Amino acid sequence: VGLNAVIAQHRGAGSTVCADVAEVGGSLADRVSVPPRAGQDVLALVAAQAAAPGGIRPSELSRFLARQPGGEDVVAGAFDGFDGAALGYDDVESLAKVLSEHREILIADTGNNRLAGSWQWATSNANVLVVPVPLRRDAAAAAHRMLLDLAATAGSHILARTIVVITDGPGDAPMVEIEAVDAFLDVGVHSVRRMPFEPLFASGERIATSQLCSTTTESLTVVASTVIDLIAHAGL
């Protein structure tokens, strides 16, 4: 949510969209400032795309997007799936196809299930991977294993376009940070960034970016800048 808002702030309204592509829907719709209405979800958009062989026009696309105060767009997740099935690889590929025709940047908010088709699409196709890691030893170890497994199956080049974001929260252990950062850099990730404790993130409430702490906004801007730089180099 924060990354989507910061990118739109600098690149302009209608430049970026964040879609919840967790296999059975995540919490994205519950965290954004303006919640998506019924029909503003990935299922509805993919179905509309399938029914429009000539493609969806910009005026039609807006019906499926929840525009936020900063000009960024959001698409809610698929809570029911197609005929009760989880959102799959082909579903997300179809979603990305229509969104890429009308938006510069797609932020795909995945779940944590590495067996999910939606997760596999995101890790296979993303120009940049952003991996948030709570400042806890168990979470850092799990993320480290995940990246090693991903590199083993997809190739080590994927780590060169990966940003790890260390997030600070209640109960986290600062003494873990140096060890965790060193471990991520040693496996070859592009960079490790730090996100300070943000009460609005920790509360689980809707995120109004105008209410974020200045340190949070600064950190999000650094992450966004790194993401844009990696996207730009991916096209070279």
Image: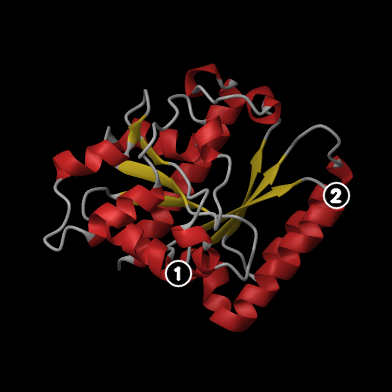
Residue 44, image x, y percentages: 34, 48
Q: Residue at x 55, y 80 (%)?
A: 154
Say if 29 sits above or below 178 in the image.
Answer: above
Q: Residue at x 44, y 45 (%)?
A: 225
Q: Nearer the viewer, mark 1 or mark 2?
A: 1
Badge 2 amino acid: Val
Say if 173 sits above or below 181 in the image.
Answer: above
Badge 1 amino acid: Tyr
Mark 2 crowd level (few <14, some 14–19, many ≥20, 10 Å Cα): some
Tell me the colour scheme of the image: secondary structure
Residue 14, image x, y percentages: 26, 37
- The residue singled out by tag 1 in the image is 89
* Residue 169 visible in the displayed image: yes
User: Is disc 2 placed on a helix, strand or loop?
Assistant: helix
- The residue singled out by tag 2 in the image is 176
Mark 1 crowd level (few <14, some 14–19, many ≥20, 10 Å Cα): some
Apparent side of residue 233 relative to residue 53 in the rendered image (left or right): right
For residue 195, what is the image quadrant?
Answer: top right
Residue 15, image x, y percentages: 28, 41
Q: Residue at x 53, y 37 (%)?
A: 220
CA gap, disc 1 and disc 2: 35 Å
Q: Residue at x 72, y 61 (%)?
A: 143
User: Is disc 1 placed on a helix, strand or loop?
Assistant: helix
Marker disc for residue 52? none
